[in-house]
Image: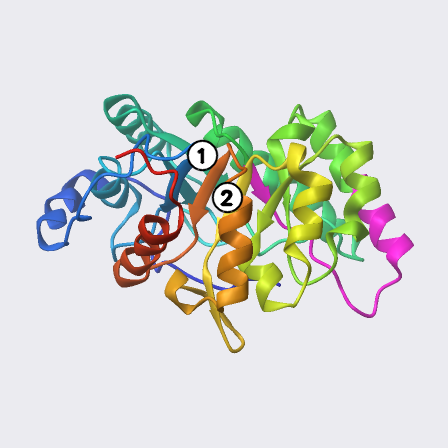
Amino acid sequence: MRQKWSSGLSADSSKTDTMCTSMKKYPALPRSFKNCFPFRIGTTSFIYPDNYLPNVRMLAPCMDEIEILMFESRGPGSLPAAELISGLQKAGEEYSLTYNVHLPTDVSLADSDSQKRENAVESIRLFAEKTRPLSPSAFALHLDWTADDSLLRWQKRSALSLAALRDAGIPGPLLAVETLDYPIEYADPLIQEFDLSVCMDMGHLFLYGLDAKKIWEKYARRIPLIHLHGVRGNKDHLGLDCLKKKDADTASAILREYQGVVSIEVFSYPHLLSSLDFFENRIVLCQS
């Protein structure tokens, strides 16, 4: 799946500090979930309708990690400015907060057009380079699948792009290939060849009827990052109260074995709040 969501905000941080005054009108989370689970719990950088730093500063006292969303690469100011990265570093130090980065989704490393693939590689390289000072736990990466494509051609094109990223100095284990709308096994030869990680997006797996338990059993040691969100009908990225019972049971069972990062991948305060109830009610390993 190619998730389309726009914050309506650029990554340019020139206005970020002045925008922080607007935090006062936003509700804070009811309590801290820091150091509460065997895994690190987090959410996205766009829970409140504001820029990166105001979101991070509101969420940092209660979360272990923030997913920095960098979906868009083509607009003016999309590339994060040095001032933003510096502000995020300071917030991380102040609140013992870590980050993961969702790389742009408006480019394709598997495009049939070689120039577009080269552009995608350069875009991914630049975003990884700009955000590396944050020491991300993972870079979530989309390898988009085209249903009318040959699997072998798709794998070969993807391999060329991944080789270029490796040659640019991006370690394979930092790149976490996200589970989308096709079986992640399609990408298995690439995962093995380039020693990639896997970002297990359980919301996508539930949405498309893919076997989350099977994927967990196969790739558990390669999963530094789980995306979790609710699904209703053909809509995802909802609060976790929208999960079917069987999917909620599957997610709970996996999380009880997990020690990486879980990002509640929602984009609003109400969806985050209902999702945190899920963790309080179902993940009994909470220590506080």
Rendered location of residue 274, percent (x, y): 30, 60
- Magenta residues span 139-160
Q: Check disc 1 and give the amino acid type.
A: Phe
User: Which of disc 2 and disc 1 is earlier in sequence?
Assistant: 1
Q: Secondary structure at mark 1?
A: loop
Q: Confirm whether residue 171 shows in the render.
A: yes
Colour scheme in use = rainbow
The quadrant where residue 218 appears:
top right
Q: Closest to the observer: 146 or 167?
A: 146
Up/down of 259 relative to 154, above or below: above
Are circles 1 and 2 on residues that touch, CB within 8 Å? yes
Q: Is residue 45 left or right of residue 288?
A: right
Up/down of 242 relative to 7, above or below: below
Q: Residue at x 49, y 26 (%)?
A: 132
Q: Is residue 87 left or right of residue 251?
A: left
Pick out the residue farthest to the bottom: 233
Q: CA distance from mark 1 to mark 2?
A: 8 Å
Q: Closest to the observer: 128 or 83?
A: 128
| Residue 141 among magenta residues | yes
Q: Check disc 2 and give the amino acid type.
A: Leu
The quadrant where residue 26 appears:
bottom left
Q: Secondary structure at mark 2?
A: helix
Rendered location of residue 18, percent (x, y): 15, 42
Residue matched to label 1: 39
Q: Which mark is residue 255?
A: 2
| Residue 245 among magenta residues | no
Q: Quadrant of the N terminus?
A: bottom right
